[in-house]
Amino acid sequence: MNKKEFSQDEWLYEIKPKTSDFSLNLKEVWRYRDLLLLFVKRDIVTVYKQTILGPLWYFIQPLFTAITFTIIFNNVAGIETGKIPPFLFNLAGVIVWNYFTSCLNETSDTFKKNANIFGKVYFPRVIMPMATVITNLVKLGIQLLIFIGFYVFYLLNGLENTLSLKVLLFPFLVVVMGLMGLGLGMIISSLVTKYRDLSFLVSFGVQLLMYISAVMYPMALIKEKLPKLGWIVEYNPLAYVVETSRYILLNEGTISLGGLVYTGIVTVLVFLVGLVIFNRTEKSFIDTV
């Protein structure tokens, strides 16, 4: 093939650097949608493939966590949950929190865990964290079925119905939690390419973050019992999401419009910062991983 013939060929695809660090390149992601779905299927099927209980772990983890919180914080520490049974109160918070932590933990290891794939074949790197968020939506759906089952059980045993049209706002909270976990995860995954020990601090940090995110207690309680430290919870955007989710599902707690606006702003900023850092890191991370 001579030079003239080569120049007249039409390429099907052209790989070139992103022109903007803020770009999600959704057009290209849509072109690779089959790969995205393949990664989602892989994550769902293989995570518990060689375990004895398999997918039952989706049910066991939130149940045992909610039971533990009920015993320690409600029975031993005496934290009251109003008219709502403590177990149901804790289960509502745990399910929402689990979605955030799953998105954060699994996204924060994107570059290191997939270095072999990234070094051999090209595809939009953002597909990996996106697949994680979608996979965890499936887990969230399964765990919501657990909540619905126990909610019906308590209804049959005298619990007053707490569901209303407010439940239509719940998907908004899921999106906020997903974007927050995705944004923080992309930031951490980019830093892990240079600072490996940061990955060991993530799980520990998430555990500490849970205690200041109102997962196992109402926000009003921390303001009442520890007024000097209540500001820590008030400035934590995740606390507003957990508190609002319980208010929507159980009509227990409070809803702060100002807090939700603050949470939305912080979420967008964290996601944009994470996107910029992720896009910059993917250009050269293979040399440092």
Image (cartoon, rainbow, N blue to C red):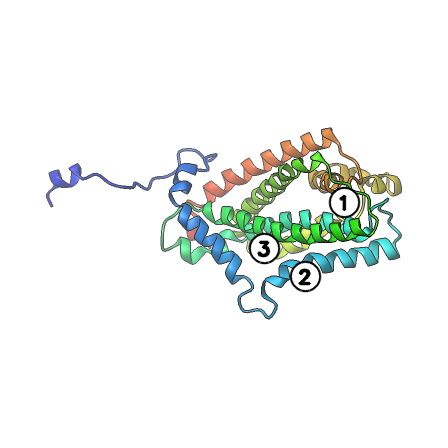
Q: Position of residue 107 (x, y in %)?
A: 55, 50
Disc sitting over residue 214 in the figure: 1
Separation of disc 2 and disc 3 at Cα? 25 Å
Q: Is residue 186 left or right of residue 211?
A: left
Disc sitting over residue 199 in the figure: 3
**Tag 1 and tag 2, C-beta contact below 8 Å:** no
In the rendered structure, which disc, 2 or 3, sits on the residue that comes first in sequence?
2
Task: Please tell me which residue lies in front, 234 or 146.
Answer: 146
* Element assignment for label 2: helix
Q: Is residue 72 above or below residue 9?
A: below
Q: Residue at x 72, y 32 (%)?
A: 259
Disc sitting over residue 5 in the figure: none
Q: Amino acid at mark 3?
A: Ser
Q: Is residue 228 above or below residue 258?
A: below
Packing grade of label 1 (10 A; few <14, some 14-19, many >=20) is: many
Q: Amino acid at mark 2?
A: Ile
Q: Amino acid at mark 1?
A: Ala
Q: Residue at x 51, y 57 (%)?
A: 43
In the rendered structure, which disc, 3 or 1, sits on the residue that comes first in sequence?
3
Q: Position of residue 251 (x, y in %)?
A: 78, 39
* Element assignment for label 1: loop
